Amino acid sequence: MTALGGATSTRDELNALNIEVAEALEKRNAVGLSEFYTNDAVFLTNGEPTVIGQDAIRRMYQELPPGDHRISFEAGEILEEGDLVVDVGSIHSQGERIARYVVVYRRQPDGSLRLAVDVPIFGAQNRF
């Protein structure tokens, strides 16, 4: 996970980060996945307890069952203010949108972005 500098847009940065996250998720690399999050990150999903902190998020990813399809993340509406970036995007599998998400990133001192709040939204409510 590296900071992108120069003329790279935030959208380009998020697109590159989304590819890295999808690859780590496909490999079920819980340690690698947890490193995309801030130490105090919050992960929220429907019907599950809130997961707080990088270590708890790593443990959550360690419990994931094997996946049968590769997923990808597509950045959507992007809002920036100070060191925070909000991405309201979508999750795809086999060419179909399967979910939406809201992610709040916090820019780190080295310029990289890490997930501070991660909210995947599955089900009928994601049809907007």
Image (cartoon, grey):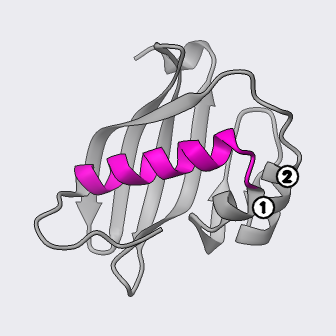
Q: Position of residue 49 (x, y in %)?
A: 83, 47
Residue at position x 79%, y 70% from top? 55
Q: Amino acid at mark 1?
A: Arg
Q: Is residue 53 visible?
A: no
Q: Nearer the viewer, residue 26 or 37?
A: 26
Q: Magenta span: helix, strand or loop, mainly?
A: helix
Given residues 91 and 4, the one toward you in this image is 4
Give the crowd class for mark 1: few <14, some 14-19, many >=20 residues within 10 Å. Answer: some
Magenta region: 11-29
Residue that carries the numbered disc 1 in the rendered image: 58
**Please, which residue is most extreme toward the bottom here?**
109
The relative height of residue 60 versus residue 73 in the rendered view (above or below) is below
Q: Residue furthest left?
A: 7
Q: Are marks 1 and 2 in contact (CB under 8 Å)?
A: yes
Residue 100 shown left or right of residue 68 in the figure:
left
Work out whether residue 9 can be spotted.
yes
Q: Which residue is mark 2?
A: 62
Q: Is residue 93 above or below residue 107?
A: above
Q: Residue at x 45, y 46 (%)?
A: 18
Inspect the image, locate mark 2, and give the three-letter code of the amino acid beneath it.
Gln
Q: Residue at x 30, y 57 (%)?
A: 13
For the point 68% across and 47% down, the residue is 44
**Mark number, residue 38:** none
- Asked if the stretch drawn in magenta spans residue 93, the answer is no
Between 2 and 89, the one lying in front of the other is: 2
